[in-house]
Amino acid sequence: MENRVYFLIIFFISFGVANTALAGDPDTFFLQPISVKYSLSEDFKGSTLKKVVIDYNNIVYVLTDKGLGRVSKNEVVTDLLYRPLAGTIPVDITTQEHTGYLYYLYDSFFLTNSYAGKVYGELPQGKFRKMAVAENGSVLLAGDDALGLFIDGKINDVPAPGEKIISIQANNGSFYVLCPNALYRLADNKLQQIHNDSGLQACTFYKNMVVLGTANGYYGVDKISGKITLPLKTQLPVQDISSVMNVGGKLWAGTPGGAFMQMNSGFRYYASKRWLNENSVSSMAADAEGNVYVLTPTGLNEIKFIKNTLFKKAVHFQNSVRQRHIRYGLLSEVRMKTPGDLSTAEMIDTDNDGLWSSFYLGSQAFRYAVTKAPEARQYVWECFSAYERLISINQLKGFPSRTFERKGFKVADPDAWRASPDSGWEWKGTTSSDEFVGYIFITSLMDQFIAKTPAEKKRVADFIDKILTHIIDNNYNFIDLDGKPTRWARWNPEYVNWYPKTIGDRKQTSTNIIAGLQLGYALTGKSLYKTEALRLMYKFGYLENIMIDLRNIKSTPGYIFLGDDMGSGHANHSDDEMTFLTYWVLYHYAFDKDLQKKYAATITNYWQVILPERNPLWNLITYGTSGSFDKTSTLWNMREFPMDMIRWTVKNSDRKDLEFLKPNFRDQVTAQLLTPEEQPIHRHNANPFELDGGSDGRSELSGSEYLLPYWMARYLKVLDKNNGE
């Protein structure tokens, strides 16, 4: 396993990783998939949705047992445009090969409104249920046990294959008939079996092949000889292929478990309610722009590819934050009373409001550093005011609350709340080191980019001074209202050095407090902070702790703290988050150049270990400190970052196209990281290799997870200004 991870690290280092200054990449357009879900009008509620077809005008039609629908805005409505056909119920619809003209099949006739409405064919009552139209105007019709070719104004019987006909299609003037056990080609008014197999379910034309879908994958045969030209592919997101189609040279498949698109390497998998109203795919069609419409038994969905830029994405998330994620100045998680329905959204408190808010404040601080936009500075001060109230709202000196709320409306961890001296308010205790990291990170950015006047600089310095004073006065602990240290905010040597060097808490906790003390000294000038930092670093080994090689951190069971085995298990990705945010402060506020070099070395060491996770923020913090960088992964992750931050339940663990690794300390489950578009929506404290997750669409993250690395990339000149900005 160690060799495998080492290989992956070397792979990433070889492709796009550098430790020298980089020129900013232009923010060029790229195609971003988004999901559009269409509602059904009252006419189609409870109907059976059979087929989706798109004509040459890009009009999207949906065939149902209650009539023909078409897309109007974001709804499937009854098609009333051609009055003679309004209210009728076609048996089938299709488009003519190459022209894209829409044809309708009824119980006893077929027609098209193209060609000035001249095309019309009388048929035996109820005999045919499917149709295909070739470019020359000939029409192949199929029933349960019948075939007919309509040409030159008359129907000609074609001997049926003797088994169920799954589909009929036209290709370059020829007709193909698919049955469960054979593929036929129509020639001289007769079916020629060109390929036989069992369990055939779908077909399409792709690179001079007929691609055949089965319950166990798909394969391709020559469309003339029927010889296999593409071996059976089984390493697919889902093997049970119910439909296939060629969209601009890319193969798409519909399955009972969602849809997927074949890429040059691997697949893009569109499943879960992030993409589809349900996973079972009944029919697919593509418009002229390559957008794919996926019909399920209960709804119509579009996987739409929009022209996007990283800047436009940042604007999207900025709007999302301002519209529904700011609670008293803090960044808020949103939950929905109706899953996925943002009109039912309400903002709620979380255990780590201070930490999560640091991502948004940080994004706006870097935004202001880049653009000098006055609203960015306003947003920063608004958020900072909330940080100040975390201290003032409680009755403890210098103790920062986790969060606060008006009395009676708390959500997360109700036992941790205490009454505030401010009438009508409550505050949340049990504050952790996670929160402390958020405090020092935002304070450093306020100092670097936002505070201009002496009064502003004093305001920022006073904030961190109060917190650090509380910590030092209480033997390097946060002391809660009960007079006891909180569970996860302890920085004293007795606690820190109790951990062996193979447990990450020793390294990470030392890093946090030394960064905070350096910052406090720089902002306040109090010698106490420098004296204490040096005492911890050299008398108690905190500098040595900071420099611990991350590759030596491993499972070390048997160290029990308050009932938890602190060394049992795997890497803690929350620790990764805390450490990298701290690294920004640790490096930029180092007491001297010699320490800064040491810090750069340990930052690079940490970065090398987490390279396979391709995290843009960790990459950028590393670049902005030690100078090492994986530019390729950074830009890839930001481009692939999804537009929808609703936490739909996602499942990838049953996919057949992934290469799974043996269990390992970093919990790298697969050989390659999935695109963020397929991962469960998560913050930066989660394992990006986690394949399953979500909350059934009951909550939404803000997108600050994107905004901070975006504006940091702009500040560090990794990314150029967008032309449309």
Image (tube, helix red, strand yellow):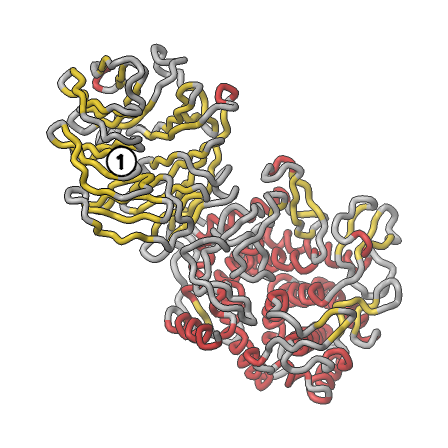
Which residue bears the numbered disc 1? 178
Which residue ends up furthest to the front in the rendered image? 162
Residue 508 appears in which quarter of the rendering? bottom right
Residue 206 placement (x, y as % from top left): 24, 44
Nearer to us in this view, 624 or 622: 622
Residue 180 appears in which quarter of the rendering? top left
Q: Specify whether residue 611 is in view.
A: yes
Which residue ends up furthest to the bottom in the rendered image? 539
Which residue ends up furthest to the left in the rendered image? 188
Quick one: label 1, few (<14), some, or many (20+) residues within 10 Å?
many
Instruction: Give the residue displayed 76% in from the left and 78% down from the top.
Output: 495
Residue 645 placement (x, y as % from top left): 55, 48
- Is residue 488 left or right of 688 when viewed as pictured? right
- Is residue 630 left or right of 160 when viewed as pictured? right
Q: Specify whether residue 518 is in view.
A: no
Instruction: Give the residue displayed 64% in from the left and 55% down from the top.
Output: 380
Nearer to us in this view, 326 or 717: 326
Q: How many marks?
A: 1
Residue 525 appears in which quarter of the rendering? bottom right
Up the image or down, 63 lies above or below 521; here it is above
Q: Secondary structure at mark 1?
A: strand
Residue 153 placement (x, y as % from top left): 16, 15
Residue 391 placement (x, y as % from top left): 79, 60
Nearer to us in this view, 72 or 257: 257
Amino acid of disc 1? Leu
Up the image or down, 561 lies above or below 438; here it is below
Up the image or down, 81 lies above or below 653; here it is above
